[in-house]
Image (cartoon, rainbow, N blue to C red):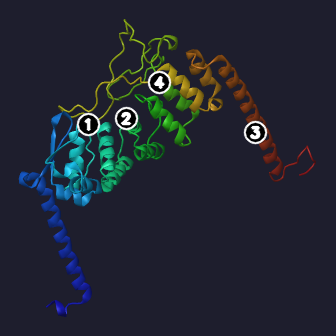
Amino acid sequence: MDDDLPLASVNRREAKLDAAQGKAVLLAVRKILSRPRLLDVTFVCEEDQEVPANRTLLASRSKYFAKLLYRDMKESSMERIPLPTVKAGSLQVVISFLHGCPFWWEPDRCADGLVDMYVLAKQYQVNSLCRRILLSVSTRRYRDGREVGDLLKAALSRQADKISSNVVRVIYADMVFDSKFFLGWTKDAITSVLSSAWFQPYVTEALIAKAVLLAAPGVPARITVDAEQDTEVCALGPSPATCDSGAKKAEDPPTSTKSAMPPGLRASGVKIFDAEPLCSLSWEDVKEIFEQHIDLPFIEPSFVVTWIEPLQILQPKILTALYSAVHLLFSWNATGRIIQNALAYHNSPNTYCAWCGAG
């Protein structure tokens, strides 16, 4: 008899029964989506695609749907609700989540789709799904800079600020930054990172500058994007003076130039990315980034001479000021090192100082 059992044992048994009850209810709720008779409202989305749902479940989990389906709004009496600008795939994820189904970021799910789901979840006040998506953004193992750049670009275009902030934190904490990192990035994505991210110590201004340059067309460098395929992504092309965002492709491109496909999951019959050009910046974009978002005086003079000056991306007056600033900076550093060495020598034991006669 339960009356003879210790209180702790009774509590454990009750907890197990409650957990079993909750699990049974959740399984029953999930099965509602597979029972058409219980789906009493249909959302007609973009391209007339339909997403059916149970209005009571939607209203019980979202204040937005409670107001839409049960208040004095015209949709409360409609069995078919038009949403002509909403993508059915994104809405289906939100509806499935409200019907008890878990959210998973599929490996082949595009960045635009993920951001679209987040924007819908925020609009429909499904805060638990918003938090789940943000957690996925923060914990996902990104393949390369291209993948995280696509996500940041999509978030910026939809003003999904929390996703953008999470992406920037991931770039700072977890991503390996190299000269190929900005391949395929837009100007807005690059400037948002340079404006808000504190890179790890090994990321120098010269490395950032090189990554920006290699995301533009016409840079005389070839980079291996995939170790398995020696793919050239930015072959020698038009000069910066004749290449901008609207420039046409050269009529006779070098025969060595290949179309580049970013590395990623390669499953039979599954297309992960479209073959878009990886050189995504115009030379006007590059000039703006260099003049407003890169600390030029901290770039090594050899890099300025080898990479920046030949490409003519900086105005002569800016280039002259840059050389002057670099000269002063390195002169100050050299003087500082001399003083530091003298002080260290003076403070070392058993040392006679010729300056002050101390020993």
How far apart marks 2 and 4 lie (CA) works out to 17 Å
**Residue 180 vs residue 21, the one in the foreground:** 21
How far apart marks 1 and 4 lie (CA) works out to 37 Å
Q: Which residue is mark 4?
A: 214
Residue depth check, mark 3 versus mark 1: number of the one nearer the observer: 1
Q: Indicate which disc residue 337 carries.
A: 3
Q: Indicate which disc residue 150 carries.
A: 2
Residue depth check, mark 3 versus mark 4: number of the one nearer the observer: 4
Q: Is residue 288 left or right of residue 168?
A: right
Q: Which residue is mark 1?
A: 85
Q: Residues within 10 Å of mark 1 (few under 14, many from 20)?
A: few
Chain-order first, disc 2 or disc 4: 2
How far apart marks 3 and 2 lie (CA) works out to 44 Å
- Label 4 sits on a secondary structure element that is loop
- Label 2 sits on a secondary structure element that is helix
Contact between marks 3 and 1 (CB within 8 A): the answer is no
Contact between marks 3 and 4 (CB within 8 A): the answer is no
In the image, what residue occupies the spot 67% across and 25% down? 322
Q: Position of residue 67 (x, y in %)?
A: 26, 55
Please give the count of numbered marks on the rendered protein.
4
Chain-order first, disc 3 or disc 2: 2
Residue furthest to the top in view is 252
In the image, what residue occupies the spot 69% across and 20% down? 320
Residue 200's place in the image compared with 130, above or below, is: above
Chain-order first, disc 1 or disc 2: 1
Q: Residues within 10 Å of mark 3 (few under 14, many from 20)?
A: few
